């Protein structure tokens, strides 16, 4: 059945059969909000000079990043979460992109910023922001996902909200200079196989990156969604490492050292390795595998109507390519349906999917399962735990289940 035919049948059964597409008969019932003039129809609104930088409507003040206080010890080494359940499409607004800091937000004048390239290069260089802006630039849309996204779910359902289970991710268009152009300017020696990216913030963030990746698709970015990076996103300069874990996307990028082997610094030894059930740890698990989540309905976004036409929505992504297909189930995996993909399909970017169905008011167990362009299929949590145990924190891309009760209220659960 084509998407067009499916949509036509959905509308026919939902509206013609009277199962409840609940447009109120406002005129017949005399609803004053449609039959009478309201203050906003008559009074003049604010002028253009009153909002020099555009802000969301006052009625959207609840759409914001949120934190979970007990997850980390101190706000300057903490995280807040993107409100995925409040968004649609694939682009995350700049003011809602999740934050993860290890030493708080570094804020300083970009005129004082420098980017150094040293180590195994023909000539060591120091760039100002003005220098970097003179290189050819590119625009690319990528997701950035923290390796710890969904990490609290390894041992079972815990955080009751899509924002908290999956909100360590955002998807924006970056503008920047391909890293390879800066490295070519310095000249890489023949034994230069790795680079160390270092941030200018107080945490001294560093990560080792193999040269193949650096020369492939990495960007040194200075804008996101058309405007300068936000301070919490690394203003004035950050590294973009498409498809790889967010900890490697070093913010406030100040130095790139070329070497002949990885450095094994703090964030790639004591942190950001995957502990297995036998006590050993996987190292260098950079790629973020295919993953998806239903954002509506979800614990923070219940179904507000009783029965009838219902739209299920979610996002999917893969660090290895695109998402050509997402499957959806509303009965806990007994029956799977192909979701409707909508919007652009970019490499290593979020994809939006929808599934329209007629809800009969009974309990639902909703799940989504992503397929990426390499043929990889998103696993269940049990499949992940069979191989890796329950001791990990990072790289949990297992299928998420929401239970929807007869009142439309959703809860984070697991089913076998």
Image (spheres, grey):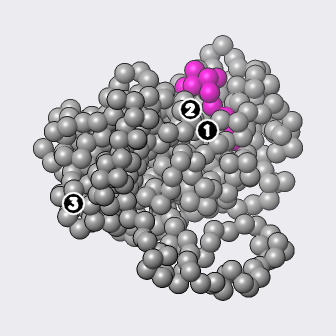
Q: Nearer the viewer, residue 214 or 28?
A: 28
Question: In the figure, residue 118 lies in which quadrant?
Answer: top right
Q: Which residues fall within the magenta stretch?
A: 208-221
The CA distance from mark 2 to mark 1 is 7 Å
Q: Earlier in the sequence, mark 2 or mark 1?
A: 1
- Residue sitting farthest toward the front: 28
Relative vertical location of residue 148 with respect to residue 162 in this rendering, above or below: above
Which image quarter is the C terminus in?
top left
- Mark 3 highlights which residue? 361
Q: Residue at (48%, 82%) from the top-left corner?
A: 30
Q: Is residue 5 visible?
A: yes
Circle 1 residues within 10 Å: few <14, some 14–19, many ≥20: many
Q: Nearer the viewer, residue 121 or 358?
A: 358
Asked which secondary structure carries label 2, the reply is: loop
Asked which secondary structure carries label 1, the reply is: strand
- Mark 2 highlights which residue? 346
Q: Is residue 54 left or right of residue 307?
A: right
Q: Nearer the viewer, residue 246 or 113?
A: 246
Q: Residue at (21%, 56%) from the top-left corner?
A: 360
Q: Is residue 100 visible?
A: no
The CA distance from mark 1 to mark 3 is 39 Å
In contact (CB < 8 Å): disc 2 and disc 1: yes
- Residue sitting farthest toward the top: 190
In contact (CB < 8 Å): disc 2 and disc 3: no
The CA distance from mark 2 to mark 3 is 36 Å
- Mark 1 highlights which residue? 141
Q: Position of residue 25 (x, y in %)?
A: 43, 71
Relative vertical location of residue 377 with respect to residue 229 in this rendering, above or below: above
């Amino acid at each position: 059945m084509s998407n067009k035919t499916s949509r036509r049948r959905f509308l026919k059964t939902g509206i013609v059969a009277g199962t409840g597409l609940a447009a109120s008969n406002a005129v017949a019932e005399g609803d004053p909000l449609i039959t009478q003039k309201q203050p906003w129809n008559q009074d003049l609104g604010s002028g253009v000079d009153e909002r020099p930088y555009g802000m969301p409507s006052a009625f959207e003040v609840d759409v914001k990043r949120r934190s979970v206080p007990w997850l980390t010890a101190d706000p300057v080494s903490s995280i807040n979460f993107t409100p995925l359940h409040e968004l649609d499409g694939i682009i995350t607004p700049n003011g809602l992109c999740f934050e993860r800091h290890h030493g708080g937000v570094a804020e300083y004048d970009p005129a004082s910023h420098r980017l150094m390239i040293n180590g195994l290069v023909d000539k060591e260089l120091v760039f100002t922001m003005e220098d970097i802006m003179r290189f050819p630039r590119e625009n690319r849309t990528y997701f950035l996902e923290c390796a710890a996204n969904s990490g609290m779910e390894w041992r079972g359902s815990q955080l009751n909200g899509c924002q908290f289970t999956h909100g360590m991710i955002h998807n924006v268009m970056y503008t920047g200079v391909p890293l390879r152009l800066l490295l070519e300017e310095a000249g890489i020696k023949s034994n230069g196989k790795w680079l160390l990216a270092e941030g200018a913030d107080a945490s001294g963030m560093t990560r080792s990156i193999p040269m193949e990746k650096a020369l492939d698709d990495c960007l040194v970015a200075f804008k996101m969604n058309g405007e300068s990076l936000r301070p919490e996103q690394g203003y004035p300069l950050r590294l973009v490492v498409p498809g790889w874990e967010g900890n490697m996307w070093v913010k406030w990028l100040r130095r790139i050292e070329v070497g002949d082997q990885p450095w094994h610094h703090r964030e790639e030894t004591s942190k950001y390795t995957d502990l297995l059930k036998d006590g050993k740890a996987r190292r260098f698990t950079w790629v973020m595998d295919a993953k998806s989540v239903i954002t509506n309905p979800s614990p923070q976004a219940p179904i507000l109507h009783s029965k009838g036409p219902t739209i299920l929505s979610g996002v999917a992504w893969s660090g290895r390519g695109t998402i050509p297909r997402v499957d959806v189930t509303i009965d806990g995996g007994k029956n799977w349906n192909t979701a409707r993909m909508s919007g652009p399909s970019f490499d290593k970017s979020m994809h939006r999917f929808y599934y329209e169905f007629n809800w009969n008011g009974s309990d639902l167990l909703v799940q989504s399962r992503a397929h990426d362009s390499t043929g990889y299929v998103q696993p269940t949590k049990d499949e992940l735990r069979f191989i890796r145990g329950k001791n990990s924190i990072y790289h949990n891309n297992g299928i998420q289940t929401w239970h929807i009760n007869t009142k439309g209220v959703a809860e984070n659960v697991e089913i076998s």
